[in-house]
Image (spheres, rainbow, N blue to C red):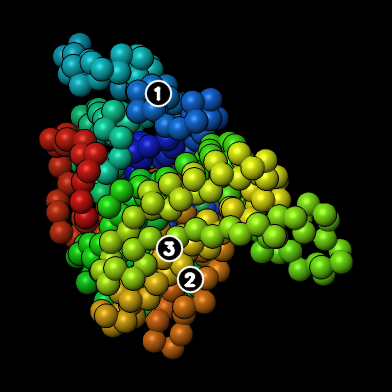
Amino acid sequence: MRILAIETSCDETALAIIDGTGDLSSPNFKVIGTALYSQIETHKQYGGVFPAVAKREHAKKIVPLLDSLFKNSPISFSENNKELTNSEKNILKNLLSREPDLYETLINFIETSKKPDIDMIAVTMGPGLEPALWVGINFAKALSIIWGIPVMPTNHMEGHIVSVLKQVEDLDKNKTDISFPGIALLISGGHTEIVLIKNWGEYQILGATKDDAVGEAFDKTARLLGLPYPGGPEISRLADIIRQNNITQSQKTMAEIEAEKIEIKLPRPMMNSGDYSFSFSGLKTAALYLIKKLEQEKKLTQEVKSRIAFEFETAATEVLLSKTKKAISEHGAKTLILGGGVTANKYIRDIFSKLANDNLKVFVPERELSTDNAVMIAIASYLKSFIVKPEINPEIIASGNLKL
Ligand code: KG4
Ligand code: ZN
């Protein structure tokens, strides 16, 4: 089955075409083409993602992206350009009434592009920023109406879980290694969840954050340290300086020696709560007080900032690790899957990869599939197609808090 997937839940406009084959017990995926536009540069100016800005950017970029995806992918087209009738144009105009610019560019594109040989369109319906989600949903519905292709509404978090299947296909020999039950640790800018995977499509959330997501805490703490958005990679970069610092005491600079004298300790919130809940806003607040205090004492040097980043990354990782291990042992998991933007963090990837043993396989997505992308949405929609039949122009409502 050839799938065109659309992902606009946050600040990446992402499209992908993949071929899905095989049944639920051994699905296979081949990526035919991808196109992605990251809005990070736009959001940097504001220090975070504003939904209205994200929506505007998606609406501006999605048609040119589809155009480039079609031009750069080895796909076939079955019908010639389509001259839209006035009634078709009216239907699309109504559908895209909140995205008038998108309507204009889409009409131009459709009238100059042939119908692609695609069997299903997958689109993220949630969770995410609703104004941003609506752009993808309405775009998917418009294409569905024009080309008569059915649409599968897809859960973004399921996408993060199944993104490792792309990798498994690449490493063909490992294909049978995903056995159930499995545990997924989903860590991103919007989510921190531990999920029990009974089978593909059968998930149970064991616990989640009560306040900030772990990526959000990385980003907020980075901001307190005066680092640019998104702060996760910046914290990780500073923390790595300390982690890799294997020089001897005598080789250290005065500033490094001074920084080491300062006690930098952050809490591990809820680490021993006995359940799978998280709270990362407490960690961020503790970082806030520490940074303020050191600032007042004029001790917040670059070296001290790196040590805070190191302590923050260590604290967050310890909490994630402790709860994940508990879930693995309590549920006899045979597989651990990591997903979400924070798995791009090198330290976290390393620490969790080390959990692998004869009884536990660990899958960490490729870096490009850790952050938001459309390949994962295509994979999730393929798995879902065994359970739910996609429809042409279905009723879909963007759901900011959609649960697994
Ligand atoms: O999954 P994602 O791309 O978008 C959401 O759905 O949220 O995750 C983005 C999050 C951001 O909070 C970003 O700071 C964090 O992932 N992130 C990292 C790293 N790279 C991205 N956090 C820690 N270390 C990293 N290297
Ligand atoms: Zn995500």
Q: Which label's residue is closer to the chain start, 1 or 3? A: 1
Task: Answer left or right for 261 relative to 25.
Answer: right
> For this rendering, which residue is in front, 392 or 311?
311
Residue 93 lies in quadrant: top left
Task: Answer left or right for 388 relative to 106.
Answer: left
Q: Note whether 127 is above or below 173 in the view shown.
A: above
Task: Identify the residue under disc 1.
Answer: 53
Task: Name the spot of residue 205 as percent of width and height, x first.
Answer: 22, 62
Task: Identify the residue under disc 3.
Answer: 268
Alpha carbons under labels 1 and 3: distance apart: 35 Å
Q: Note whether 203 is above or below 48 in the view shown.
A: below
Query: Residue placed at 30% from the left, 74% from the top?
Result: 327
Residue 85 lies in quadrant: top left
Q: Note whether 110 is above or below 235 in the view shown.
A: above
Query: Residue placed at 14% from the left, 54% from the top?
Result: 388
Q: Which label's residue is closer to the chain start, 3 or 2? A: 3
**Badge 1: residue crowd in 10 Å (few <14, some 14–19, many ≥20):** some
Alpha carbons under labels 3 and 2: distance apart: 18 Å
User: Looking at the picture, which amino acid does disc 2 mark?
Assistant: Phe
Task: Identify the residue under disc 2.
Answer: 352
**Badge 3: residue crowd in 10 Å (few <14, some 14–19, many ≥20):** many
Query: Residue placed at 33% from the left, 71% from the top?
Result: 272
Task: Name the spot of residue 287 as percent of width and height, x first.
Answer: 50, 49
Q: For the N terminus, which image quadrant?
A: bottom left
User: Looking at the picture, which amino acid does disc 3 mark?
Assistant: Arg
